[in-house]
Image (spheres, coloured by chain):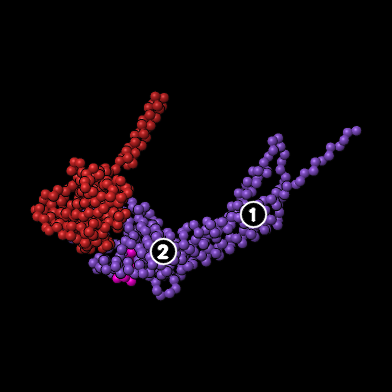
Amino acid sequence: VSRPARVTTLLVALVAVVAGAVFVVLHYIGGGPQWENYVPKASGGQVNVIMQTDAQTTVTDRPDWVTYFIQNPQTGAWDHTTLFQVPANTQVNVTIYGFDGGTPGRNQLWGAVHGTIGGTSTVTQVDAKGHAGPATPTVTLNTWNGDVQHTFQIAGLDLNVPIAAPNGTLCPTSPCSASGNPYTINKFSFRTPATGGIFRWNCEIPCGLGYLYGMGGPMQTLSYMSGEMQVVS
Amino acid sequence: MSAEPQPQTQTERNDGRNILVSWLVLCVILEPLVILVLGPHLPPGALSSNARSQQIDNIVLTALATPVIVGVLLYFGYALIFWRQKAGDDTDGPPIHGNTKIQIGWIAATSAIVLSLAVYGTVELIAPAGAGAGEGPAPVWKLSGSNVLQVQVIGQQWRWTYRYPQFGGMETTQLMLPEGMPVEFHVTSLDVIHSFWAYQLGVKADANPQVDNVAYTTPEHLGQFTVRCAELCGIWHGAMYDFGKILTPTAFQQWATSTETQLVSVTKLLPPYALTYNPDLIPQLGKALTSGGLTGAGGNFYGPQYSVQP
């Protein structure tokens, strides 16, 4: 083998290794879901956070995974992420549009609302024609008969809110549109602590079916059913 | 006529005596400090009977190790100071010969220490009442007395919950215990393997699905303790912790009765209290839902076209 060929081979191999390392760093380590910054939107000691739950994630290469979406506070677009920032010592008013169907829960305790202001969540059923039922203050939903699709749980704040399941045929693509699809509107509020920090949150309904005990796959992946809330002080 | 050089008289240094005396002095000074000053701060504290017992074990081991550590460091320091080779001195050191008495004494002493520690460790491994370890569903070493509080510890990705069968089977995320009352933990899991580690209580028991793992303790002081999962169980394993409290018997009774009342609507929907729960039930229900054509099970139970992944 000639010297130029050896040098060329060496350089190509070097470039390949460097490119691989850069790809790994950018794609797996430096990448990840984006943060939705709700801090600038806080006003009067309150901030509104809006999410939705979907039965599928057609915007990713995991189309059959359940997922959360968070509304971008600046653009209003639905972003595929579960990371958001809120200010400290603030009342967070959460609205979750639940487009997914019910999944039997493993522990009925997660069917109980806990840690919210007032100890309740307000649930409204909306059918595919857009007809909304009454906004019903809810303390407990039955996870065993499919009333609950997911939960929004922040363990560090001892917060747990079951997300009610809608009635009817679920929307087939994500992010779901309120037009032509049944969904539930789940509203609740909680207070962030006075000091900053990152609080993990996740769903406690084993909706990663097909995975070990339903808690694998989307349940253990950021931007699907696990997320983080950064409290900014 | 030249005068004969007279040999210089030099006081011989007795290294063995110096080291022995120094070692004894240091041990006399340090042992009380280790036992009385450091000892009460050794883990896991003295919040419960098990913790106190484990702390005593750590004090015993530290006290036994102290003379050894002092001896090694003293010998090392003495050698550095007094046996340092002088400049220009290329002579060999004195030859070392075997000493049967020392060898027999060394073997006898170390054997006695190791064997006595083995006996001590074996006794401490089971006292008191299993030493805070999980003993499985049929514990051999039990707490005496009939007034025992039963608490079921349920591990699930990624929370601990606690059921109190003597208070209507209520389930909460709070672990409250009364001071002075023996506690019987029944540790189990709803999904994968976890490990219930109540650090300051000195209790550690595996939480396995469909296994009732019993562990005992008696809280002896008021205070707060940390509960951690000690078995890697998924993405939020590191965040699977909470804090328990030891209350006065009166405060515990008030908390338990008020919580039982608050949770009555949830308790009604809970499965009846049982020592274990079947984690396969949920995937089976999900499969039945989807095969029955019902919506829901958002994660979609993977059909035959998908490979089921762990």
Where is residue A36 shown, x and y percent of the image? 24, 44
Where is residue B135 shown, x and y percent of the image? 43, 66
Tag 1, which chain? Answer: B
Dot placed on the residue nearer the N-terminal end, 2 or 1: 1
Is B167 part of what is drawn in magenta?
A: yes
What amino acid is found at the position of numbered circle 2 in the picture? Answer: Leu
Residue at x 31%, y 61% (from the top left corner): B173
Residue at x 25%, y 44% (from the top left corner): A39
Residue at x 55%, y 56% (from the top left corner): B34
Quarter of the image holding residue B227? bottom left
**Would you say residue B251 is visible in this rendering?**
yes
Q: Which residues are magenta?
A: B161-168
What amino acid is found at the position of numbered circle 1 in the picture? Answer: Val
Q: Which chain is tinted purple? A: B
Q: Are marks 2 and 1 in contact (CB under 8 Å)?
A: no
Quarter of the image holding residue B252? bottom left
Residue at x 35%, y 55% (from the top left corner): B240
Where is residue B213 shown, x and y percent of the image? 39, 65
Numbered tag placed on residue B80 in the rendering: none
Q: Which residue is mark 1?
A: B25
Alpha carbon separation for disc pair 2 and 1: 40 Å
Q: Would you place residue B124 above or below residue A15 in this image?
A: below
Q: Which residue is mark 2?
A: B222
Q: Which chain is tinted red? A: A
Q: Quadrant of the C terminus of chain B?
A: bottom left
Where is residue B37 shown, x and y percent of the image? 53, 57
Secondary structure beneath disc 2?
loop
